[in-house]
Image (cartoon, rainbow, N blue to C red):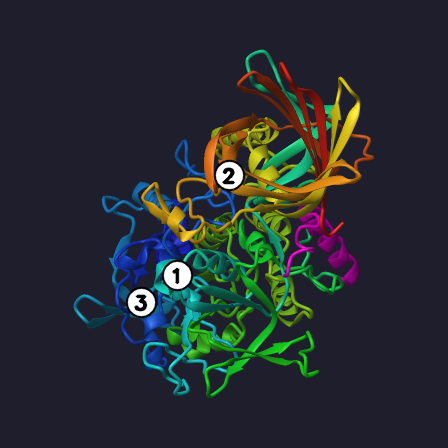
Amino acid sequence: MLEVAVIGAGTSGLVAARHLIHAGLRPTIFEAARTVGGAWTPSSSSALNAPTKSNDNEHYYSHPAGKMWSGMTTNLSKYTCRFSDWPWPEGSNTFPTVEEMNEYLTSYSDAFLAPSKPMFNFLLECQVTNVEQLNTSSEFNYKVEWMDLQTQTCHSRDFGGVIVATGFFNRPRWPSFLPRNYDPRSHVGRKKYSKPQISHSSTYQSNQLFKDKSVAIVGASFSALEIAADVSKSAARVVSILPSVPWVLPRWVPIIELLRNKDEEGNIASKNNEDATVTILPIDLVLYQRTKAYPQIPETTFLDPESCRTRHKNLQSMVGSKQLHSPLGEPANWDEPPFVAISDEFLDLTREQKIEVVNGRLSGIDDAGNLQIESKQLCRDGSELMSIDDIDHVICCTGFISNLESFLSPQIIDALEYDSEDSFSPLTLAWDTLHPSSLPNMAFCGMYRGPYMGIVELQARIAAGVMNGSVSISCEEVKSALEISRSIRTATPKAQFPHFDYIGYIDTLAKLFYDDCYPIFNVNIGDVVLPSFYQANEEISEKSKQELETEFLRGQDGSRMPNIVLQSILGKWSFERYIMHLQTNKVERVYGTVNYSKYFERSSNDEEEIDGDLVGHIFKHPAKERPVLYREDGVYELSPTQKFDVFREYEYECNKDVLDIFFVEGGKRAHLFLSLKFVPEILSCNGGHNGEYWVKATSDHLCIKDLYSATFRVKLNGLSASEIVIKYRVKGPSKDYESTTILKPSWS
């Protein structure tokens, strides 16, 4: 029985070990931390690492445990963040937290890698320090050396195969003006100034550590935008320094989809090919829909300018004009590949000046501690170098570089054409998994930038299949795959990820392993691709397909619409209101501005305790979405000669499937005014809507003896609203009028 060393017990290592066992092989799993989970390991569980054979200053970062901050949620849904044969428990959050991801991986390990199983060894708190290839014709191909971190003793053993599953998130990548081995704890390579302090996103833990500080966040990635949004809850000032402009998408997005129908028993009967409606879905269920029937191959590995422009246009259609009219702006060059970052709040925070945006690259820090920014925007003096002063802390969200040179022998490093400075794609591998001609029975799982659990699992299946002989790959296939790997590494301009064509990549791996047996579900154009379809258990696939259909139904029932409406209307509007008195036909006019603010301020004497969180300067609402303040400032025109200033305030708040509107009196929320349940208006599949659509809600309110019948209509395009129409029909003993208010965004 072939014995295989698996280095790492994170996402990749666990699934690799599980499929080695399934293939009849015997894995030994090496993990430097005390628990499984890798990058999803809570920081309190990480073990202190021993120095590796590379630079001793790097030992603090040599293991990926603890790279996620507490409470962080995934940027892809549970449908994509899962293994094919291990569903999430019923009722799990659609976007799991880091703690929930760790629990998921632990449960997977308990199910398939329990200590009672005799087919493997689990060596926790054991740091691999060297792997070298043996020149022998025996069954042992590799020598593995490691240190037991508990006993501080060194050990070695020969194995028939090795799977490297240490992941890509190993050692922080710093801005170019800092040395490669920069260590904020020892101040190696740092100038002598009192501030700012410098840290990396990998050590970020809580916004409370930056209370009342001025903080700069460097980077344009998911972590950069999410950390900036999180820090803004406590910091006095937040500056986001972005070297490039990504498309910023939230976790939930509305799209135009065919209307789903149910039969009498509540099951999905069919799609209505005549009518379409607004469907609100997790972002990955929108992005990962087939453009070709299975197999969607060959994988796209290069984007020409026309393809880039098409992708930019598709992303813009999701965002609408919201990003264009924010301080961030849209990407300027649509001839180059688009970058995407997922964040629910970043754009709104920039639009309300809670986060300052600087488009440029941090090039240095001068002797006075001022940040030097190379900006494409000319400064007042005509230079392209701007300075930001009075920053207390800089958080570098600048990515990671791998650390394979710290434990792989020079011979193996050379065979892999490894470049430790390449943060994009540092290895040459067939399908980012194998190099069989030079390194037989050595495989890599999850060793590429942006690993997906479905991809990693297929890499593990292929590696195990090659090692036990059940998967046969020709020399020509391997040669072609290695050339593709080299072309990805040298391509310019580079895409956001080496394998940006997720569906093409997962289909390529599936065809390699399954030939054409699987998937059998969701193989047509427009179908959503999920990891659960790439395995042989049809019961699991059937259940997953039903869950997916249920998700689409929920996306069409209007329950998610209040959040989308509330996001879309944030910002400044101009309005005109006409009040028609039906008894006299007299018309009165009100005009002015409206500001919908999510991060509104309260005076210090209005502080209150909400769900255990002190609310004051900036409204914090930990239990649910923040309310939105409607502030109207206008002029009431009774006649051409009679005018006076008016203002009013309401609070809008999502409450499950309705949008509640409360009166605000004396600066404080008063009683409920209206509860609005928005319903998207049905659209024709013949088009003509140009991506724009209306949503509508009605509600009544009895104010003593007066009945207010309200109709709200909001015109949406992607995530932005372009028009709001609010109508009231008011009837009572002394009132009989209709009020129509039309709001237009201030940028229109």
Q: Secondary structure at mark 1?
A: loop
CB atoms of marks 3 and 2 within 8 Å = no
**First reached walking from the N terminus: tag 3 or tag 2:** 3
Q: Residues within 10 Å of mark 1 (few under 14, many from 20)?
A: many
Front-most of residues 481 and 667:
667
Distance from label 3 to label 2 (Cα)?
36 Å
Residue drawn at point x = 68 percent, y = 83 percent: 381
Q: Is residue 463 visible?
A: yes
Q: Nearer the viewer, mark 1 or mark 3?
A: 1
Res. 596 image quadrant:
top right
Residue 532 is tagged as 2
Report the predominant secondary structure element of the magenta stretch.
helix
Q: Is residue 295 rendered to the left or right of residue 407?
A: right
| Residue ID for mark 3 | 158
CB atoms of marks 1 and 3 within 8 Å = no
Residue extending furthest toward the left: 151
Chain part drawn in magenta: 304-327
Residue type (three-letter) at the residue carrying disc 3: Asp
| Residue ID for mark 1 | 67
CB atoms of marks 1 and 2 within 8 Å = no
**First reached walking from the N terminus: tag 1 or tag 2:** 1
Residue drawn at point x = 68 percent, y = 74 percent: 377
Work out whether 710 lies above or below 9.
Answer: above
Residue type (three-letter) at the residue carrying disc 2: Ser
Q: Is residue 502 rendered to the left or right of residue 108?
A: right
Residue extending furthest toward the front: 641
